[in-house]
Amino acid sequence: MRVIIDDRVTRNFDAFYNAAMERHISLSEETVMKKKSRLIESLKSLGDMPVLYDKARLKKEWMSAGWREFICEDFHVAYEICTDENDEDYVWVRDAEHSLLYH
């Protein structure tokens, strides 16, 4: 199944890791790039079995939208399964928040 990653998700990844690198001088850009690469690959794999994960249970915005949630690299990721105009299903990754900020 096709996976679409919202710009909001990648902006949240970038913002978190930029702040992390400023606070932790031992955190290298190379390490961050590897983490972000693993995150993106995990998001793409949602297309294989998107119904595997449950609906969001903590963040009100995600719950009211009916989004599903999974965790990867300490990020909570919200997504929904949609159908396009050709009746083909796809996964739309809508939001992401690091566990330290998740509430």
Image (cartoon, rainbow, N blue to C red):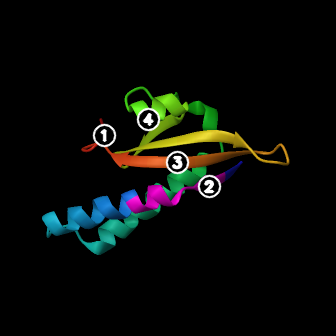
**Image x and y of residue 14, in percent:** 36, 64
Q: For marks 1 and 3, give the CA distance.
A: 15 Å
Q: Which residues are magenta?
A: 3-11
Please say whether residue 7 is one of the residues in the magenta stretch: yes
Residue marked by disc 2: 4
**Mark 4 packing: few (<14 Cα in 10 Å), some, or many (20+)?**
few
Q: Are marks 1 and 4 in contact (CB under 8 Å)?
A: no
- Label 3 belongs to which residue? 94
Judging by the rendered image, the residue that carries numbered circle 1 is 102
Marks 1/4: CA distance? 12 Å
Q: Nearer the viewer, residue 32 or 4?
A: 4
Q: Residue furthest bottom?
A: 29
Q: Above or below — where is 15 with respect to 55? A: below
Look at 47% across and 38% down and name the residue there.
Answer: 70
Q: Are marks 4 and 2 in contact (CB under 8 Å)?
A: no
Picture coordinates of residue 15, whole percent (x, y): 32, 62
Residue found 42% across the figure and 48% down from its top: 96
